[in-house]
Amino acid sequence: MARAGGPTVKENGFLCDMCGKRFAQKWKLKRHSVCHSGLKPHACDICNKRFLRKDDLKAHLQIHEESKAHVCEKCNKDFSRKKDLQRHMVVHTK
């Protein structure tokens, strides 16, 4: 069953009309739908970088924190996020 201008609802979830992805909850489809709009509504107040999802902005804000608890044991470079330290470690394997 489909609603005019809305998502197609099937027994196994909510279908995105743009790409065919299915979601168990309507709110997840709504969150996903923003990716098709081209908009990035969440902006960092510090550097103005924009993000599609609020979760991504929250993760980004960690790079601006004073505390850089993740330190490379090889070169002492420090990082706010563990993920960034892990990505950095590749430079020491070349």
Image: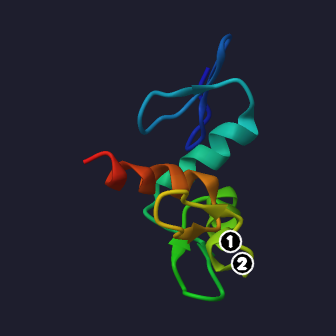
Does residue 21 appear to the left or right of 10 in the view shown? left
Q: Amino acid at mark 2?
A: Glu
Q: Percent position (x, y) of residue 93?
A: 32, 45
Q: Measuring 51% from the left and 49% from the top, which residue is drawn there?
A: 86
Q: Residue furthest front?
A: 74
Secondary structure under the numbered disc 1 in the rendered image: loop
The structure's colour scheme is rainbow
Numbered disc in front, either 1 or 2: 1
Looking at the image, residue 19 lies above or below residue 79? above
Q: Nearer the viewer, residue 56 or 31?
A: 56
Q: Percent position (x, y) of residue 16?
A: 52, 34
| Mark 1 lies on residue | 68
Q: Measuring 68% from the left and 10% from the top, which residue is drawn there?
A: 11
Q: Measuring 74% from the left and 41% from the top, which residue is drawn there?
A: 27
Does residue 59 appear to the left or right of 89 in the view shown? right
Q: Which mark is residue 65?
A: 2
Proximity of marks 1 and 2: CB atoms separated by less than 8 Å: yes
Q: Measuring 59% from the left and 35% from the top, which residue is drawn there?
A: 7
Looking at the image, residue 62 lies above or below residue 72? below
Q: Nearer the viewer, residue 5 or 17?
A: 17
Q: How many marks?
A: 2
Q: Percent position (x, y) of residue 39?
A: 49, 67
Looking at the image, residue 81 lies above or below residue 13? below
Q: Amino acid at mark 1?
A: Lys
Mark 1 surroundings within 10 Å by alpha-carbon count, few (fewer than 14), some (14 through 19), many (20 or more):
some
Mark 2 surroundings within 10 Å by alpha-carbon count, few (fewer than 14), some (14 through 19), many (20 or more):
few
Secondary structure under the numbered disc 2 in the rendered image: loop
Identify the image quadrant of the N terminus: top right
Residues at marks 1 and 2, CA–CA distance in whole angstroms: 7 Å
